[in-house]
Image (tube, grey):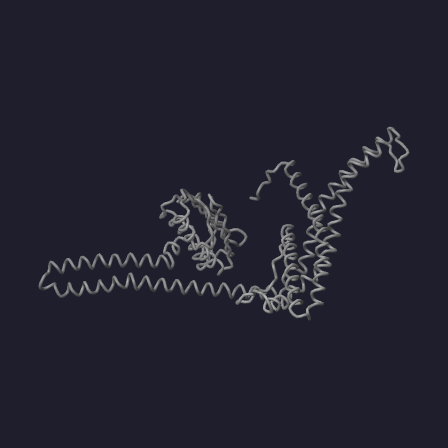
Amino acid sequence: MAPVDVAGPDERTYEWARRGVRAVLAGLAAIGLTLANVALLVVSLLALVLVPVPLLGMALVSWTTTLVRKRADLERRRATSAGVPVPRPYQPPPQRGIAGGWRRFRWIVTDPATWRDLAWLLPGGIVGATLGAISLAVPLYGIMGLTLTPLWIWLGTDWYGYGTVWSIDTFGEGLICLPQGAAILAGGLWVAPWLRRADAYFARLLLAPTKAAELRLRVTQLTVTRADTVDAQAAELRRIERDLHDGIQARLVSLGMTIGLADELIDRNPAAAHEMLAEARAASSAALVELRHLVRGIHPPVLAERGLDGAVRALALSLPVPITVDVDLPGRLDTPVESAAYFAVAETLTNMVRHSRAHTGSVSLRHTDATLTMVVADDGVGGGDPAAGTGLRGIERRLAAFDGTMALSSPPGGPTVITMELPCALSSPRTTRSSGTG
């Protein structure tokens, strides 16, 4: 069933007017930023003219293009706030860094996005200023119709200052101007967001990545995520080898030695042989438990049997902190995605238990618009930082392998909310919806 709009007419009118006023202010800002565009264009042309000058020209180009990029990034943010997302198109810096000098100059100058930014400055400023002036002038004209024009007519003041004339006719003309001014003001507030979006679409023509740039950025991103995935897999294999060597393998070697000694003593000292066999039985049980833990760390059986819903619930029940689990998954995910989602949630909950000193927590899983959204929250002390080595970087790398993202909100004092998203499709439908407390 479609969601019902419960907002009242007053609230909808207020929201509509607020959007219009914000668009008008954005148009006013566009007029002012046009001056910055012109100044940056002049300085950039001067820097290009001075390129042959040793050191000075190269430094000026690096400095001015950095300012141009900052201005272009500001326009991208403005366009995104207007509902037209514009991603950054720039090439990643060289692996060895770009502290300055020739490497930085070559990195900036050889990037086609730099020249597209320069090409946008003048036409972008003209279009932004024109549309901004229109979005500003129409509401101002309406306000004038609501205030100044009726006042002039009612007072009967002509434009030459010869006096005032009071009459019923002029009073009526003033009343007629009120709805006209209100209509013009309303029309200006209505059209201002559309003008702002038109400006944003024009900015996207030059400031967004081209198809070639998108492909190049995608290849770079895949290269980085592939390297992270390979490193993570190598670390996981080393962990499994270490657990096998130091744990199960040692127990099995000890188990074989114990059985061998029991075999030698079974004729001479049956009682001691029985004791050793009992120790061997206990050692085999311990090895089996360790093997199950190791398998669970690779791919939990409950995940294969009950899916992400059941696996997360089982994980929540095993934690010392009460965890509320709310799941709305209309089907099963593909096995690699399901495993990545499970271990991301598991690592997040482990961090919560170890570091947050939380009393309660919650996990929410939703699949909408071909995206799995996982939200893990707690009422702990907050202050989470991916750079602090609490496993959050590992979660980011695990999700990045599937084009997933992670957003962290953890102010000092809490609460902590971690939102993870994984683009994915459902492999099999399910009709039930479940929620509960772990």
Residue 223, percent from left and from top: 51, 66
Residue 405 versus residue 122: which sits nearer the camera? Answer: 122
Please state if 222 lies on the left or on the right of 54 as rendered.
left
Total labels: the figure holds 0
| Residue at 44% over, 64% down | 231
Residue 104 versus residue 420: which sits nearer the camera? Answer: 104
Choose top left, top right, bottom left or bottom right for residue 218: bottom right
Q: Say above or below: 47 vs 20.
A: below
Residue 49, percent from left and from top: 72, 67
Looking at the image, the residue that sits furthest to the left is 268
Residue 352, percent from left and from top: 41, 48
Q: Say above or below: 56 vs 181.
A: below
Quadrant for the C terminus, please. Answer: top left
Asked if one can make out residue 432 in the rendered structure from this viewpoint, the answer is no
Asked if one can make out residue 349 in the rendered structure from this viewpoint, the answer is yes
| Residue at 42% over, 47% down | 356
Please state if 216 lies on the left or on the right of 356 as rendered.
right
Please state if 404 lies on the left or on the right of 202 as rendered.
left
Quadrant for the N terminus, please. Answer: top right
Choose top left, top right, bottom left or bottom right for residue 75: bottom right
Residue 307, percent from left and from top: 41, 53
| Residue at 76% over, 39% down | 143
Looking at the image, the residue that sits furthest to the right is 162
| Residue at 68% over, 70% down | 53
Residue 221 versus residue 306: which sits nearer the camera? Answer: 221
